[in-house]
Image: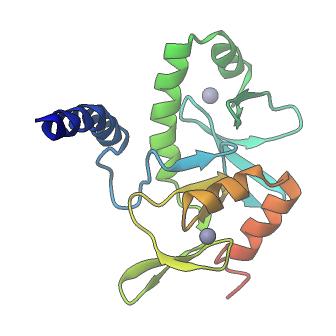
Amino acid sequence: MKKFMVLLMLVMIALPVLAEDQAIVQPAADDVQLGTLHALNNVYAVKDEHKTALCACGKEFEVTAETASMNIHGLVMYACGPDCAAKMKNASAEEMIKAITDWEKAFAAKDMASNCMMQDGKKMATCACGGVFEVGAKTPCVVENGMKLNACCDGCTEHVMKASPEERAGMMKKAMYSSEKK
Ligand SMILES: [Zn+2]
Ligand SMILES: [Zn+2]
């Protein structure tokens, strides 16, 4: 009887955790990684030093020295103009979460340079650690300056995110399958 009670308690502890997990992992389109995206800024393309970003309002624009930005828990969000910058500054926490969620969906779907390539019908990536693995819906990825780095595990994700911006840029550039590399 005692054993049963312990089991029951374990189940009761485990259940809410499971439910939470399912809420985080949402069904997504094949190429859209949600809940696993760690964006460090909203730039999705860099070409000849020109940075193109996706504003929270959905507008695509070029980031210049005058572009206003806001740091939202490590995500540097550039605003397309003064109106959006003011909107972001004055947004409530709730409005911000909603805006970021919508933005994340559009941003994750952008065609970006990545460390992913198709091999025998499988989407394979080479992690910053050198490990080769298959990319799935739950693969964590770090995005910065138009580069999407899929990582083999949470440890590698953290390692990349904690690196200095220069180190990270180096790691990401090295891992990318860019047209220059081919
Ligand atoms: Zn905007
Ligand atoms: Zn790794």
Q: Residue at x 52, y 57 (%)?
A: 140
Quarter of the image where one finds residue 83: top right
- x, y percentage for residue 22? 29, 41
Residue that sits furthest to the front in the current view: 2
Relative to 25, residue 87 above or below: above
Q: Quadrant of the N terminus?
A: top left
User: How far across and how far down the image is residue 130, in percent?
Assistant: 66, 79
Residue 162 lies, in percent from the top left, at 76, 50
Q: Is residue 45 visible?
A: no
Q: Which residue is found at the position 35% from the left and 84% from the top?
A: 121
Q: Position of residue 157 (x, y in %)?
A: 63, 57
12 vs 159, nearest the viewer: 12
**Rendering colour mode:** rainbow
- Residue at image x 32%, y 44%? 26
Quadrant housing the C terminus: bottom right
* Position of residue 7 in the picture relative to residue 41 (left or right): left
Ligand 1 lies in which image quarter?
top right
Asked whether 121 or 125 is in front, the reply is: 125
As drawn, is 139 to the left or to the right of 149?
left
Q: Is residue 13 above or below residue 162?
A: above
Query: Against 66, is 116 above or below?
Result: below
Q: Nearer the viewer, residue 146 or 153?
A: 153
